[in-house]
Amino acid sequence: MVYQVNIIKERFKKYKLYFLNLLFIAMAWSLYFLFFNSFYKEAAFYIDKKAGIVIQLLFLTTYYLDAILVYIALAFILLTIHQLIVVYFFISEQKKLTVNKKVQPIIWLFVFLFIICLIGLMANLIWPLFLLTLIFSSTVVYIIYVATKYIYEDTQNLYENNENIKLEGPFKTKEEAQAYVSEFDCYWKDYFDKKGFFIHSNIELDDSNNYFVYLYTISKNN
């Protein structure tokens, strides 16, 4: 029991940034829907349910426009922040040049939460306005992502021939080290191919009988 608690503590400490951001965005969305649902129930009470969807939407935007604009603005902020968090962690993992299977489920939690929140935003009469908000928010995030990726690739990913790009270890067995090399190559092969490089690996055994993996770039032009 104590051992399991220690593992949880160590994992939380190692991935604290991920968990804190997940907690923040989950609490922010929870508060948003708490207030929005309260407002929407009150506003929808006066809607003529027999009227068409367009008439009902016009009714809401006519009598509750100020409140709706506030909730749309807040939704835009939350949607943008949520997507930027995912993009940030995605780019961060790229910079590490590693395949971290423990991080991937956390990122998928962000994506799952995002989908749940989208469903919540679309499950009301104001969904066309929220859909436009989502499109605009995603456009902003995409522009930021492209600009950041362009700057990152131009300034950080300029490799030279026979450059050491990664040191990973220790591994207890050579088989574990070879498995890591295969996983790395599978994940990054296409990326370095586009850069004009092969990935060369070198597995070394140190004095403490641990294996370390050295990864190098080999230019295709040589």
Image: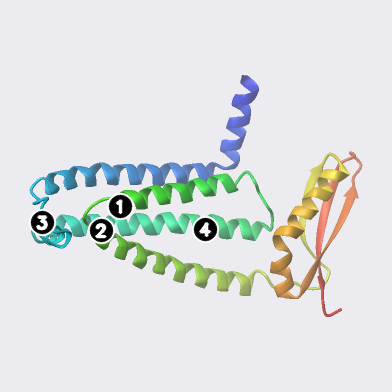
Instruction: Check disc 4 and report its element: helix, strand or loop.
Output: helix
Q: Which residue is mark 3?
A: 51
Going by the numbered disc 2, the residue's amino acid type is Ile
| Position of residue 31 in the picture relative to residue 156 (left or right) | left
Dot placed on the residue nearer the N-terminal end, 4 or 1: 4
- Asked if residue 26 is positioned above or below residue 159 in the image, the reply reads above
| Disc 1 residue crowd, few under 14, some 14–19, many 20+, Cα 10 Å | many
Q: Amino acid at mark 3?
A: Ala
Residue type at mark 4 is Tyr
Q: Which residue is mark 1?
A: 121
> Residue 72: image x %, image y %?
25, 58
Residue occupying the far front of the picture? 50
* Circles 4 and 1: CB atoms closer than 8 Å: no
* Figure quadrant of residue 185: bottom right
Among all residues in the image, which is located at the extreme top? 1
Q: Earlier in the sequence, mark 3 or mark 4?
A: 3
Which residue in the structure is indicated by mark 2? Answer: 72
Could you say where residue 151 lies in the image, as x and y percent from the top left? Answer: 56, 72
Which of pointers 2 and 3 indicates the residue nearer the eye? 3
User: Mark 1 and 3 residues: CB-CB less than 8 Å, in contact?
Assistant: no
* Residue kind at label 1, given as amino acid type: Leu
In the image, residue 143 sits, relative to residue 84, either above or below, namely: below
Point 40% across, 56% down: residue: 81
* Mark 2 or 3, nearer chain start: 3
Residues at marks 3 and 4, CA–CA distance in whole angstroms? 45 Å
Mark 4 to mark 2: distance in Å?
Answer: 24 Å
Q: Which residue bears the numbered disc 4?
A: 88
Q: Nearer the viewer, mark 2 or mark 1?
A: 1
Look at the numbered disc 3 and give the secondary structure of its residue: loop
- Dot 2 lies on which element? helix
